[in-house]
Image (cartoon, rainbow, N blue to C red):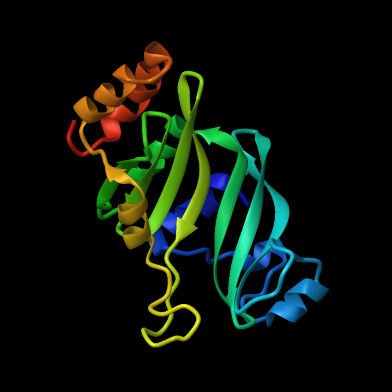
Amino acid sequence: MSLRAVVGEYLRHGRLLSAAAFGLDPQWELDVALAHGWERSTLHASATEQLERDVRLRHRGGWRPLTLKPFYLRGRCLGASLDLWRGLPLAQALPWLRELRPAPALEWFHFVGADQGAVLVDGRTGLHFRRRGRRFVLTAVDASIAAPADDPDLPGGFDNGQWLRNLMAPCDEPAQWRALAARDADPHAALQAIREIAPYLPGR
């Protein structure tokens, strides 16, 4: 599969649909997934756990390494996230948002300064990015996870929108990003990165 197709599943549906292509059956209990070669992300077992496996996806004539991380609640798979640990230029992924119909609701956030942030798509999918030099790179794709409001271990599930709104500060305006860049250790590089995302900001 291609990276574009997999990220597109998150953007259109708010979750990964093609888990089987990575050797993961969402119906498997956690112990079965472990028996099929998936590894725990942490050393200690608990009611909420993540497994992981390194995979490669096609992208622009080459291959992009990433880590797929399925999430389990009491042994049952509820969803998965992507960790693009080598990063993908954010400017390559943002045009995919314009292909969505109907057009998605976008919320932009920054974390502390002009070097890290996220885009929340339709209130459920988070595209996380950080700055490397003069460019922003996509580093992770997260999705909301549903669970009953009275669940003892994950009450109400994981609301990606609420989590991002609590963790980061909204930053939809180009002027807000430029103000952050002015306080950056390398304002010129920060402004160069911001120019790539400016056409996609709701307040442009």
Q: Quadrant of the C terminus?
A: top left
Q: x, y (%) of residue 3?
A: 57, 46
Q: Quadrant of residue 149 in the image?
A: bottom left
Identify the residue at horizontal 39%, vertical 44% (top origin): 118
Q: Outermost residue, top direction?
A: 188
Q: x, y (%) of residue 9?
A: 47, 58
- Is residue 99 visible in the rendered image? The answer is no
Is residue 171 toward the left or the right of residue 32 in the image?
A: left
Pick whichever, 7 or 34, lies toward us: 34
Is residue 48 toward the left or the right of residue 23 in the image?
A: left
Q: Quadrant of residue 27 in the image?
A: bottom right
Residue 153 higher or lower than 42, as above or below: below
Is residue 53 toward the left or the right of residue 81 in the image?
A: right
Pick whichever, 44 or 63, lies toward us: 44
Pick whichever, 34 or 11, lies toward us: 34
Q: Outermost residue, left direction?
A: 203
Identify the residue at horizontal 28%, vertical 35% (top origin): 200
Q: x, y (%) of residue 36?
A: 80, 71
Q: How many marks?
A: 0
Residue 32 higher or lower than 116, as above or below: below
- Is residue 107 visible in the rendered image? The answer is yes
Q: x, y (%) of residue 55?
A: 71, 51
Identify the residue at horizontal 37%, vertical 36% (top origin): 112
